Amino acid sequence: MRISTTIFLTDETITPVRLARELEERGFAGLYLPEHTHIPVERTTPYPAGGELPREYGRTLDPFVALGQAAAVTERLGLGTGVTLIAQHDPIALAKRVATLDHLSGGRFTLGVGFGWNREEAADHGVDWASRRRLGRDRIDLMKALWAPEPTAYAGETGESVRASEAWPKPAGGAPRILLGGAAGPKLFARIAAQADGWLPIGGRGLADALPALRAAWEAAGRDPKALQVVPYAVLPNPDKLAYYADLGCEEAVLQLPPGEEAEVLGVLDGYARYL
């Protein structure tokens, strides 16, 4: 099983360049970065994990800029978002950003997509909370139209549209790997089967119960059963947990790193090396 990592990189942590080099030298498979554009101070949305929102959420680096730095100093390290808050992006600009990063990195990019939890953050982007998932669905399909080999128009149910256009560069493989995040359920699983390459479940809890339903939705959509990818994300590892994921057929797990300075992060990497 490939072992990747995720971290809240901020202006106070280890730098993307230093971390990326250390990950590749040590043999880790990838680096995934989260996204928050800003955190409104007056916020009624509770932090999903409970308690006070950690400091790093309001200081997070732009993941695409940081991953661009990581790509420039590595050759093999996988690069991904965990997750891109797609409802908060102009999809035409995002399609260009994704394609450019994937092209320049030689096809190493994974687009992790999520729909967010912070209503106030989304509202500042003009997002109607109730329709954000439908909007995200349309925006994924619009981006795929721009990545198509020939100019392809798209018009979605939510009003998202693009004319048939020349849009280069293309992602290295025609489209990046797309993983959808979110809680287990029939709507998410149907969307994964229709649009994505797999699931990015946070923490990996309840996988044994959820996977039969996901696999059923995947096969009902006519997808190759062997192609489904399930990547437990933000995992605090131990040997039994990783063995459990491997037994379930997971080929990659993403381990959580602390949002710390260089010495702290590299010390945790030293501990995680035993899982490689």
Image: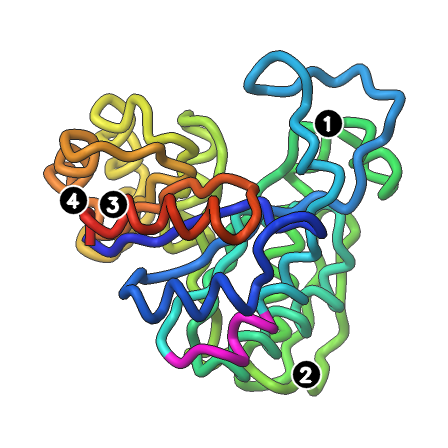
Residue at image location 22% in from the left, 30% down from the top: 212
Asked which quadrant contains residue 93, the reply is bottom right
| Tag shown at residue 219 | 3
Residues 149 and 119: in front is 119
The residue that disc 2 covers is 167
The residue that disc 4 covers is 249
Q: Which is more N-terminal, label 1 or label 2?
A: 1
The residue that disc 1 covers is 130
Residues 223 and 246: in front is 246
Q: CA distance from mark 4 to mark 3?
A: 16 Å
Coloration mode = rainbow
Say what secondary structure mark 1 lies in. helix
The x, y position of residue 100, in whole percent, is 61, 79
Q: Quadrant of the C terminus?
A: bottom left
**Residue 86 shows up from this direction:** no
Instruction: Name the kind of residue labelled 3 in the image.
Output: Glu
Say what secondary structure mark 2 lies in. loop
Camera-nearest label, 3 or 1: 1
Q: Which is more N-terminal, label 3 or label 4?
A: 3
Q: Which is more N-terminal, label 1 or label 3?
A: 1
Mark 3 in CB contact with mark 1 (< 8 angstroms)? no
